[in-house]
Image: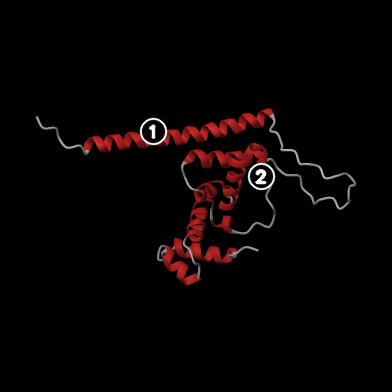
Amino acid sequence: MTKYSSELKLQIVQDYLSGHVSYRTLCTKYGISSMAPIWGWVKQARVHGLESLQRKRTKTVYSLKQKLAVVDYYQTSGVGVASVAAHFGISASQVTVWVKIFKTAGVVGLRPKPRGGRSTVKHKQPKQIKKKLEPSEKEAYQQEILKLRGELYHTRMERDFLKKLGAVSKNNLPPKKQ
């Protein structure tokens, strides 16, 4: 069960998009404690349309390629989780989960899981120690590429920041006396 119904989300976004109401006013009017969900709904509606706010009745299964695209975009775009979620039309919590899994388990953790429940038949074998899944050669390359792209993005940001800092500090130096 979702916290807010699709109808409520649509009503709030339509109120905001009419141009006469602020986020804070909508929070007070509808009893929502934070402006963040409203901001996310409005952003999602602007990018994907109002129909994207409707609750989906079916479970969406994402491929490894789609998950890696989301993680890569998050690492290299410099935008927040909500913006990435709106860009791909998924929930912000899903983006957070995939990024966390990628950071801890790598590409292997993002593999699609087998569907179905556990077997109810008891096996007489002793408990087996779970082996850590090893990535295939292709997955290892994908993982390395994503890691390096993220590092490259952060290094470029750091370089640009230091350039700006150098330029600002150079301009703020007092003139030399002769």
Identify the image quadrant of the C terminus: top left
Residue drawn at x 64%, y 40% is 105
Q: Is residue 118 above or below residue 21?
A: above
| Element marked by disc 2 | loop
Q: Where is residue 160 shown, x and y percent of the image? A: 37, 35
In the rendered structure, which amino acid carries the disc numbered 1? Arg
Foreground pick, 51 / 83 = 83
In this view, the residue farthest toward the front is: 126
In depth, the one of 169 and 54 nearer the eye is: 169
Q: Position of residue 126 (x, y in %)?
A: 86, 44
Q: Earlier in the sequence, mark 1 or mark 2?
A: 2
Residue under label 1: 159
The local crowd at label 2, few if under 14, some if 14 to 19, many if 20 or more residues have their Cα within 10 Å, is few
> Left or right: 22 with respect to 32?
left
> Whole-percent x and y of residue 112?
70, 42
Identify residue type, mark 2.
Tyr
Q: Which mark is residue 62?
A: 2
Quarter of image, res 23:
bottom left
Q: Is residue 92 left or right of residue 127?
A: left
Q: Nearer the viewer, mark 1 or mark 2?
A: 1
